[in-house]
Amino acid sequence: MSEVAERNSGLTEIDRPGSLPATRRRFNLKRLLMGVALGALVLAGATYGRHWWTMARFLESTDDAYVGGEVTVIAPKVPGFIDQVAVGDNQAVHAGDLLVRIDDRDYRAALARAEASVAAQQAAIGNLDATRALQQALVMQAEAELVSAQAETARTRADFDRYHQLSSAQYASQQRFEQADADLKKAKAGEQRAEAALEAARRQIEVIDSQKRQAEAALDQARADRDIARLNVGFTQLRAPIDGVVGNRSARVGAYADAGAALLSVVPARGLWVDANFKESQLAGLHPGQEALITADVLPGEVFRGRVESLAPATGAQFSVLPPENATGNFTKIVQRVPVRILLDGDAAHLAVLRPGLSVTAEVDRRGGAAGKAQVGEAQAGTAAVVAAEHP
């Protein structure tokens, strides 16, 4: 027993079992943590590399993108005082709902006057029809009188011829012959008068027909005025053209509204899109039909899906009020951006959180859009054909 104690007493502190110093233990712990960190780093790198190889290298993204929509500005077609405002700010409306009503009393009075004018013109046409029927009877009477006058002329001519022969043979007096001559002249004058009366009666029918055509034209004008008056009455009621939400409301009861003055806007509840402004260096692989992912700050973590609809025909700078002019002595190249229209998929309830004008981030997958590539190819081929035809 004493020998064992002596041997143990001869060992150093390091050689003694179970007596590793604290520095050695800390060193082993560091090595373990470094190994774990290195493994996590390698795993993260492998995961990122796989993501980049399988997806990220095919994505084109930009944060210069905004939600768009067909915001409809509601303005009256006719001026007047506002009689009723049926909606409030930020109120949801459906197509056909009444938004604003303008006082329509003046327009209803104008409609009544226009309808009375139509009735008057219709009565005038009816009167002309009756007058024409009466004149037609007068024509028939004139024709009968002409026949009678012609018969009288024939009779007096026969008497004249007979008394002329008798007077030449001294069988009739000269007085009787002169009477027969006067009767013949009188009959001829009566026949001419009957012919003139018949012609006048017939011409009067033409006058009546002309007056009727004029009255019919006036009736058409009166009907057009009535239709305009009726439209103006309808225009006093401003209704929602689409489903959406009311915004930018300035209409107030009692205020005077000019024709064309904006009273409120209706933001659509569906049919939203995204206008993403991609750099010109990103456009090579973008085509209509490619899938897109949209994220918005208004709803972090939510991903909206869409599809590229079209690419703008020019850069955004070309559509500005003052396009840039680079034909100067000093030139600094600025990367241009081209708007890309992305239609959003999903129902109205899913897209209800989005609003026109919101900033979003858009990512487009360049692997899709075969149909869009075909369309671009056809367009390029058509352009080349036109250029070749113009410059043989």
Image (spheres, rainbow, N blue to C red):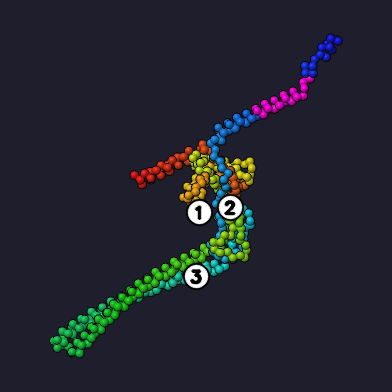
Q: Would you say residue 27 sits in the magenta stretch?
A: yes
Q: Is residue 210 left or right of residue 319?
A: left
Q: Height in image: 197 above or below 337?
A: below
Q: Would you say residue 387 sits in the magenta stretch?
A: no
Closest to the observer, 216 or 357: 357
Mark before the other along the chain sequence, 1 or 3: 3
Residue pushed farthest right? Answer: 2
Q: State the residue at coordinates (49%, 52%).
A: 323
Mark before the other along the chain sequence, 2 or 3: 3
**Which label was assigned to residue 380?**
none
Q: Height in image: 365 above or below 76?
A: above
Residue 312 seen by the camera: yes
Circle 2: element type: strand
* Pointer 3 local density, CA inside 10 Å: few below 14, some 14–19, many at least 20: some
Q: CA distance from mark 2 to mark 3?
A: 42 Å
Mark before the other along the chain sequence, 1 or 2: 2
Picture coordinates of residue 353, whole percent (x, y): 62, 47
Q: State the residue at coordinates (50%, 54%).
A: 322
Q: Is residue 280 left or right of residue 167?
A: right
User: What amino acid is at disc 1?
Assistant: Leu
Q: Tell me the residue that label 1 is attached to.
A: 322
Q: Nearer the viewer, mark 1 or mark 3?
A: 1
Q: Nearer the viewer, mark 1 or mark 2?
A: 1
**Which label was assigned to residue 267?**
2
**Which label was assigned to residue 116?**
3
User: What amino acid is at disc 3?
Assistant: Ala
Residue 129 seen by the camera: no
Part of the protein shown in magenta: 18-39
Q: Height in image: 168 above or below 341?
A: below
